């Protein structure tokens, strides 16, 4: 990679602004296929794939260099993904419901006005009830107005102070994420050589473009077979959606009916077998140890559920008390809390030499050549010399967020620990997504669940519980659309760039503009249609559930939960043993990432595709070795391309016809 030019940054911002308008309209108004959801969203890769094709054709016809390099298209993809994520699922989808729910729903049978509102800061919410009413009902006769008139009718004087306060929290959080990405990026990319399997397809396309071999890539028979399989599958199922007389090829098998609701196999009575070509492709391109662990631990988690039932050790869901975790229904799932903490410690331990190097560089001007014990990497480019700003940026950013939390009602110790819990979860989640090739990941337990389980709700206090519930919901609870994995993917994208600072600057600018554009577009949609008419049922339900959990903890404070402590401790012990075996024994077949996500709802959809991808990878390497793998991988690249190209086509068709066919099951 020779560098990133301004044209790619401008194109990334242009596509990003367009995505900020298209993504919320497509999902909230049309109820169409989500185009910006997940850790590898549909629309940004669809755009990147066509840019590869267009630049390859331009280079072939014109005989010169392509107008964009492959690496530049990857930067455009990363910037566009940030806009697509923030403009809806990653922030804007539930943000306005979250900060207006106490005013809107307090009179509908909920006791928030008396139980929560006295503890919630006035600066977080619009002060005028009419402002909230307009948001939910829309402006009068707004359907006949254009968006310029809608923008003029929005009561900005009520919204700007609120958005300003929240923007400080949001942008400070994004700044810490960028610092963590830069701080751990060299460790993951250069020292550990993390594979980033979801980036393999665009990287292969980019390398072919840069090497002038796009023709050979697009005529590769294995790629064409994979592309044809995925396209034919979705052509048949898409036509079946529009013309029901055409039989559908089943891609979702409900296998739970073959298992009993009680007994050893009761953990599988809701088992689903989902066949998604792109997810099979991601699993094939992931290392076998990880793909095996992902589906293997899911099976083991189901067996554990049945085993506890048979032994009479099964606890009721009420044993966990009140939690905020979106998937934390069973006590045994609390193991993930301890597992996350131990895995975070493991990540820091792996990076100990790198962090030592960064620390020494930050406290004295003489850098790496004189650092004893620092790891040497002959292949590490010179520009990876550790900068000092990410370390101090992380520390100062976390302190700023702690002060922000304390100012708005959290006790001092809770204000220090809560942001730390937030970013422990975000860093571990990013590692699981990037290394595991997981296209979307949901949390089992919320960051605050571990703190309340360990210390009790009194650790936060009534005001702190209310404030924590709201802050957590803004950025750190619904991590399926988190920006953190995209930031680490962009770190891999710029691995050999001579203008890495330009890439980081472009990402930072994208985050700022994405927040501003996401707020503006969502406000206009809400005032044109009204939240009641938008497809925001999921956001509304989860926000209400979040406030209800906070209300219960305020009404009835709880002490430390012994079962959460027991299962979290068990999870920490198991994760410690897994890490020890993984690190010390080369033959060890299980990767700790599988245990991290085994209780997540994600694997209920992903596990069978992960199994198929792992099985193909295993058979390929066992019987054909790396020679066959290097040929056959293009079949799975074709499956990924076919799914995303089909997804983009049916998303556009759905926007036109209002008939939705979802290529991906999320």
Image: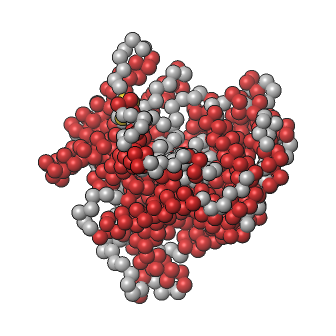
Residue pictured at 41% horizontal, 49% vertical: 311
Above or below, 487 against 270 in this view is below
Is 554 on the left or on the right of 334, as rendered?
right
Q: Please state the horizontal and vertical placement of residue 528, each as a whole percent of the image.
A: 73, 30
Residue pictured at 43% horizontal, 73% vertical: 349
Residue pictured at 74% horizontal, 42% vertical: 101
Above or below, 161 against 143 in this view is below
Residue pictured at 29% horizontal, 41% vertical: 612
Q: Residue furthest left?
A: 623
The answer, for residue 89, to whether it is visible in the render is: yes
Q: Please state the horizontal and vertical placement of residue 466, each as a whole percent of the image.
A: 73, 53
Q: Please state the horizontal and vertical placement of residue 128, each as a whole percent of the image.
A: 86, 43
Q: In the depicted view, which residue is nearer to us: 100 or 525? A: 100
Q: In the depicted view, which residue is nearer to us: 388 or 54? A: 388
Q: Quadrant for the N terminus, please.
A: bottom left
Q: Residue furthest top?
A: 245
The answer, for residue 61, to whether it is visible in the render is: no
Instruction: Examine the image and state in which quarter residue 173 appears.
Output: bottom right
């Amino acid at each position: 990679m020779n560098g990133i030019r301004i044209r790619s940054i401008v194109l990334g911002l242009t596509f990003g602004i367009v995505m900020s308008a298209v993504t919320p309209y497509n999902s909230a108004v049309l109820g169409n296929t989500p185009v910006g959801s997940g850790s590898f969203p549909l629309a940004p890769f669809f755009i990147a794939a066509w840019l590869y094709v267009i630049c390859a054709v331009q280079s072939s016809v014109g005989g010169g260099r392509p107008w964009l390099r492959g690496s530049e298209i990857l930067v455009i993809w990363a910037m566009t993904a940030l806009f697509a994520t923030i403009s809806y699922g990653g922030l804007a989808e539930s943000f306005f419901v979250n900060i207006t729910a106490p005013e809107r729903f307090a009179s509908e049978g909920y006791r928030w006005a008396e139980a929560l509102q006295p503890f919630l800061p006035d600066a977080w919410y619009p002060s005028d009830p009419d402002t909230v009413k307009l948001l939910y009902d829309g402006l009068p006769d707004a359907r006949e107005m254009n968006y310029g008139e809608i923008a003029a009718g929005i009561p900005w004087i009520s919204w700007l102070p609120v958005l300003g306060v929240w923007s400080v929290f949001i942008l400070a959080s994004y700044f810490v994420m960028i610092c963590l990405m830069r701080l751990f990026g060299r460790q993951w990319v250069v020292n550990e050589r993390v594979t980033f399997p979801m980036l393999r397809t665009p990287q292969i396309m980019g390398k072919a473009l840069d090497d002038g071999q796009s023709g050979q890539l697009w005529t590769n028979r294995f790629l064409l077979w994979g592309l044809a399989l995925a396209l034919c599958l979705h052509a048949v199922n898409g036509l079946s959606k529009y013309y029901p007389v055409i039989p559908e090829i089943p891609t979702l098998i409900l296998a739970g009916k073959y298992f009993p609701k009680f007994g050893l196999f009761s953990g599988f009575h809701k088992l689903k077998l989902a066949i998604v070509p792109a997810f099979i492709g991601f699993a094939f391109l992931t290392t076998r140890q990880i793909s095996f662990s992902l589906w293997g631990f899911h099976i083991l988690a189901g067996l554990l559920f049945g085993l506890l039932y048979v032994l009479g050790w099964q606890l009721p869901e009420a044993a966990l008390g009140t939690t905020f975790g979106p998937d934390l229904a069973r006590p045994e799932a609390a193991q993930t809390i301890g597992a996350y903490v131990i895995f975070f410690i493991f990540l820091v331990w792996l990076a100990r030499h790198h962090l030592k190097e960064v620390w020494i560089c930050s406290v004295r001007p003489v850098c790496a050549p004189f650092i004893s014990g620092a790891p040497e990497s002959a292949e590490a480019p010179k520009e990876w010399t550790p900068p000092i700003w990410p370390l101090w940026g992380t520390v100062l950013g976390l302190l700023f967020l702690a002060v922000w939390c304390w100012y708005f009602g959290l006790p001092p110790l809770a204000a220090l620990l809560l942001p730390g819990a937030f970013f422990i979860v975000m860093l571990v989640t990013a590692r699981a997504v990037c290394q595991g090739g997981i296209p979307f990941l949901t949390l089992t337990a919320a960051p605050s669940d571990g703190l309340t389980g360990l210390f009790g709700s009194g650790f936060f206090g009534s005001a702190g519980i209310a404030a924590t519930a709201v802050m957590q919901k803004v950025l750190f609870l619904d991590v399926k659309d988190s920006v953190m994995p995209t930031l680490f993917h962009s770190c891999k994208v710029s691995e050999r760039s001579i203008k890495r600072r330009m890439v980081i600057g472009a990402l930072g600018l994208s985050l700022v503009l994405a927040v501003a554009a996401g707020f503006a577009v969502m406000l206009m949609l809400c005032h044109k249609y009204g939240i009641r008419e938008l497809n925001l049922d999921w956001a509304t339900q989860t926000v209400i559930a979040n406030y209800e959990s906070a209300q219960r903890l305020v009404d009835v404070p709880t002490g430390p939960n012994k079962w959460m402590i027991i299962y979290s401790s068990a999870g920490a012990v198991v994760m410690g043993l897994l890490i020890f075996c993984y690190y010390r024994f080369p033959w060890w077949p299980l990767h700790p990432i599988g245990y991290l996500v085994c209780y997540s709802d994600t694997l209920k959809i992903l596990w069978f595709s992960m199994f198929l991808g792992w099985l193909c990878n295993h058979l390929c390497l066992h019987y054909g070795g790396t020679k066959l793998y290097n040929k056959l991988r293009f079949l799975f690249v074709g499956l990924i391309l076919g799914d995303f190209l089909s997804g983009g086509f049916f998303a556009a068709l759905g926007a036109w016809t209002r008939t939705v066919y979802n290529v991906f099951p999320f």
